[in-house]
Amino acid sequence: MERVIESAVCPFCACLCDDLVITVVNNEIKEIRNACRLGVAKFRACTCTYTHARTQASQRLKCPRVGGRSSSYDDAIAEATEILRRADKPLIYGLCNSSYEAQRVALAIAMRKRGVLDISESICHNILYTGSGLKKYPFYYALLDEIREKANVIVYWGSNPVVSHPRHLSRYSVYPTGRYAMRGVTDREVIAIDVMESELKKHWLLQVKPGDDARIAEILTRLVSVSGDCAAQDIDEDTDIERLKEIAERLKRALYGVIFIGLGVLGVGSEDARHNVDAILALVDALNKGEGRKYVLFPMKGHYNVMGAVQLLMRETGYPFGLDFSRSSTTGTGTGTGSSIFEPGKTTVMDVIEEGEVDAALIVGADPATSFPGDKVKRLAEIPLIVLDPFETPTTSLASIAIPTAITGIEAEGIAYRMDGLPLKLNKIVESEYPSDREVLERIYRALF
Ligand code: SF4
């Protein structure tokens, strides 16, 4: 029996492309249209007919494990519940590859248990929520649809979407037609600023030295603010000032411009990242002083539902990540310390692991054993570790309890928020033997409370 699912949403990156056409025959995905190679690889990772998919499928976490031995779901969930019941202060981490509904349940567990809840945003984009960032500059989100319609100058700074978000250019920024770019790419200036040479070099690529982003932003700010010759004084000899002048001219031509910033700017250590963001925000500020010109600064989010987690946490707690509910006097039954539940440097995943403050961890759809520094992974491995994931990962291999879950957007439905904050419904494309992470979390919640 054949089914064709139109307008399916891709659950890989935060572009959440919603124009996929997927053909399913006898509960197997036969054809995937409109997805990029990353999206196709994710759909092929479930039960489907491609040869490559079978390789991927062998990496699925096949059945629950308790203490390294195969187990039933009932036993694994009962053991996981017991670990969390005994824990004084559990850590719940991950959730950016989960539906909004699953994120809500995880938040409820963290609040009732007075634990710590954190997401990858505390490592990748934390600088945007602290310091001068959001409070000082009126740059934050334009909808991607507005950018597609209006932007005629596109800058990718410290990000290479061709690799990380392959359809970003064709759906939202460079290639589609828009009100100020009736001929698509022909009517747009495209500028890439990066330490790496990228596929965007056929447009305007400025290759900068590592750690030089803030200085380049400061020079560009001067160039767009006053006459180029005057601003070029006292700039050192190594700087390609002619190239910078040309880029400044292009930036100034915008009616509507956008600077997409990525981990090359944000993921470089907190002091450098803060310096980079402040300098680029100052450039946006200077550009916005031009009459009839508007610029926005837009962070390139990675995981497909990191924005869902941020929106949920902001809505429910007023803070975006790194929440320590043991400090709260308003949740659960304990007394709390009355300190703020959000204090980067004390309440994020890295802080509480470093200080040995958490005595169990529930990791949902994340792989800290790959992405965290070795000393943090070692500490994590010393406490009871529960992992919910569709796939085998280095973290599942460390887990006391590993519970396989369905892939949301393929084997389970749910809501996810696109990188600009737009909520979208993810479909269930095929039936699966695995429960969703929302279902597993709900069973744990019901057993705990
Ligand atoms: S750009 Fe991202 S959301 Fe779109 S198809 Fe590719 S991986 Fe999927």
Image (cartoon, rainbow, N blue to C red):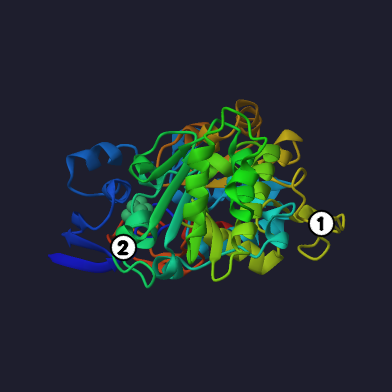
- Which of the labelled discs sits on residue 340, or is there none? 1
Query: Going by the image, does 399 lie left or right of 84?
Result: left
Q: Quadrant of residue 333?
A: bottom right
- Which residue is at a point 70% across and 46% down the rendered structure image? 348
Camera-side residue: 277 or 285?
285
In the picture shown, does residue 423 fall above or below 53? below
Query: Going by the image, does 417 lie left or right of 23?
Result: right
- What distance separates the C-alpha of mark 2 from that of mark 1? 48 Å
Which mark's residue is nearer the viewer, 2 or 1?
2
Counting from the top left corner in percent of width and height, residue 85 is at 67, 50
Badge count: 2
Q: Is residue 138 visible?
A: yes
- Which residue is at a point 48% across and 40% down the rendered structure image? 243
- Which of the labelled discs sits on residue 58, or is there none? none
Counting from the top left corner in percent of width and height, residue 205 is at 42, 41
Residue type indicated by callout 1 = Ser
- Which residue is at a point 60% across and 30% down the rendered structure image? 373
Camera-side residue: 396 or 165?
165
Crowdedness of circle 1 by 10 Å Cα count: few (<14), some, many (20+)? some
Q: Which residue is mark 2?
A: 184
What kind of element bears circle 1?
A: loop
Query: Going by the image, does 382 lie left or right of 189?
Result: right
Q: Quadrant of ligand 1?
A: bottom left
- Which residue is at a point 55% across and 62% down the rendered structure image? 296
Residue type indicated by callout 2 = Gly
Query: Going by the image, does 78 lie left or right of 341?
Result: left
What kind of element bears circle 2?
A: helix
Q: Is residue 60 visible?
A: no
Camera-side residue: 65 or 307?
307
Viewport quadrant of the N terminus: bottom left
